[in-house]
Image (cartoon, grey):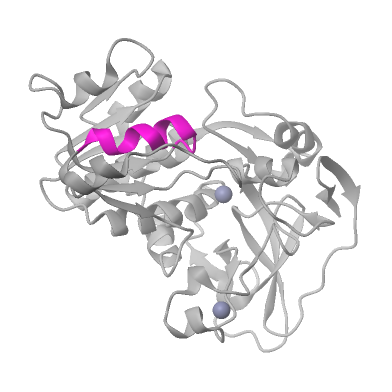
Amino acid sequence: MKAVRLEATGRLALREVERPHPGLGELLIRVEACGICGTDRHLFLGEFPSRPPVTLGHEFTGVIEQVGDGVHGFRIGMRITGDPNIACDRCPECRRGRVNLCHNLQAIGIHRDGGFAEYVCIPQQQAYELPDTLDPLHGAFCEPLACCIHGVDLAEIRTGSSVVVLGGGVIGLLVVQLARLAGATNIVLVTRSEEKRALAERLGATASADPSTGDIMARVTAADGLLPGGADVVIECAGVAETIEQAPSFARRGGTVVILGVMPQGVKVALEPFDLLFREIRLLSSFINPFTHARAADLVASGTIKVEPLISRRIGLEEAVEAISNPARKGEIRALVVPAIG
Ligand SMILES: [Zn+2]
Ligand SMILES: [Zn+2]
């Protein structure tokens, strides 16, 4: 079968590899779609640790082709979404229920072969059923959505909350929708891209703002701004130093800032502890998807979260190498690798 292999940092290639065989408790999945995520580009550049040689792709969905011994509750032909993050269940953090902080975390598509391939083999406990009637590509959004749900949970958005979302990529546009569902009344998305601002407003943002023109802070937090005094919750979804540094200033006194965007390892930012302390800003970070994948699958399956407008292009495995090795195209939200395309 064909697979997109990270052979070493900066070396990605489409290779012919042996089709995996499901071991004890494993499922062989015929991949229908797998999203290209910023993390894949970080892995390619060596900005995020991985274990090459490995097949990338952690945002996959597909249909069960074969089941290993000891599999229960799954059958051939069932559509599933995969939670790529495998916790060990034995380390101190797992025993405290903090599975995303597992000392031995293994991720499908990072440490073991993932979904940029015709088939992927996964442990059954990582699979969540999706309806047959669902668009076969939509399941690829369950993984990023599950990460966003964790961030929105941590933010404790309540009925009537005001929220600023920084960044209009797939994470920002999913967070806008989740904030709305969680009961936020005012949701402001901040991004340079005009198309993304328009899309955010279609998906539930009450307003949007362009940070590249004028005084963005005044436009949002001034007495005559969009959210006078600042937001209850600010969620950083861009993963760039500039927005992390700005994030606390968008929050009101006593407000919460959640960092959801992934920054390259080693990057430092400048924050002002005096301001954080005297305004008692709660600064949190949100890492992956502890116990949120089932909720993500339900939200995608029911159509409650709109994912179709987030698909910018569908490409085959042949084109995937070039797409992962380069920055996302201008205005692109999510490119999906669809192995059936070729
Ligand atoms: Zn991802
Ligand atoms: Zn563990």
Which residue is outermost to the top?
A: 214
Q: Which residues are magenta?
A: 238-251
Q: Quadrant of the N terminus?
A: bottom right
Asked whether the viewer can see residue 28, the reply is: yes
Q: Assess whether residue 17 is covered by the magenta stretch.
A: no
Q: Where 98 sits versus 215, above or below?
A: below
Q: Is residue 44 left or right of residue 284?
A: right
Q: Is residue 143 left or right of residue 45?
A: left
Q: Where 34 sits versus 84, above or below?
A: above
**Which residue: 48% across, 79% down?**
93
The picture quadrant where one finds residue 154 is bottom left
**Which residue: 31% across, 40% down?**
176
Which residue is outermost to the bottom?
A: 70
User: Dividing the image into four equal quarters, which quarter contains ligand 2?
Assistant: bottom right
Q: Quadrant of the C terminus?
A: top right
**Which residue: 25% across, 33% down?**
250
On the image, the x and y values in percent for residue 88 come to 59, 80
